[in-house]
Amino acid sequence: MSDQQSEQTPMADDAYQPTGTNEEQEDAGPLDLQDAVGERSYDDILDEGYSPPERPLGVTKHGTTAAEQHEGETLDERLGQEVPDVDAPAGDDIGDLPGGEGEPVDPEAGASRAGRLVAPDEGAHPDTVKEEVAHDVGIDGGAAGAEEAAVHVVEEEP
């Protein structure tokens, strides 16, 4: 009885085998540009036209004819096309000036980092001191965000 059942029930491999016909599945065909969302329509592509390059490309290079392709390039011709790698000179990036002090320091930014600014009511209590907007409670024990770390103390000029 189990032999009869196995002959009638298709196995997993048999279920997804090609049918042998040359027909495409309905959803496997090429996409229609009219149905594409956010794409240029077929009429727009035809209206756009083609703009050739300003000058012909590749006509001066070796291998544009069948004879040149058959002969191939010599090693000297291939090496003549190579462009050597150029290293950037030392001291070209910010802070890597030989004999410099590292990253440049902006004198207007200040040297000491500011802590966290907290409102007098700490955001939870009624504000009794109307003149004070916020005060510095020091640097947070955890890691500061980029915005907090960018705040520095600048001395006032007399």
Image (tube, rainbow, N blue to C red):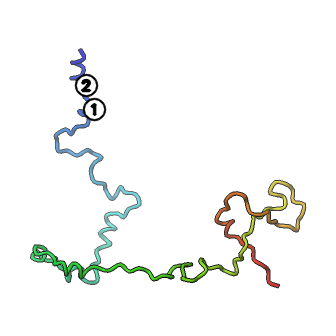
Q: CA distance from mark 1 to mark 2?
A: 10 Å
Q: Nearer the viewer, residue 99 or 17?
A: 99
- The residue sitting at 23% across, 33% down in the picture is 14
- The C terminus lies in quadrant: bottom right
Q: Residue furthest front?
A: 99
Report the disc number at residue 96: none
Q: Is 144 left or right of 80, judged from the image as shown?
A: right
- The N terminus lies in quadrant: top left
Q: Position of residue 106 (x, y in %)?
A: 66, 80
- The residue sitting at 87% across, 59% down in the picture is 127
Q: Residues within 10 Å of mark 1 (few under 14, many from 20)?
A: few
Q: Position of residue 135 (x, y in %)?
A: 82, 65
Q: Residues within 10 Å of mark 2 (few under 14, many from 20)?
A: few
Disc 1 versus disc 2: nearer the observer = 1
Q: Residue furthest right?
A: 128
- The residue sitting at 73% across, 72% down in the picture is 112
Q: Nearer the viewer, residue 83 or 123?
A: 83
Q: Which residue is mark 2?
A: 9
In the displayed structure, would residue 112 be above or below residue 59? above
Q: Position of residue 87 (x, y in %)?
A: 41, 79
Q: Is 123 left or right of 41, judged from the image as shown?
A: right
- The residue sitting at 16% across, 77% down in the picture is 73
Report the disc number at residue 12: 1
**Three-letter amino acid code of the residue under disc 2:** Thr
Q: Quadrant of the rendered structure where residue 101 is?
A: bottom right
- Secondary structure at numbered mark 1: helix
Q: Is 81 left or right of 70, judged from the image as shown?
A: right
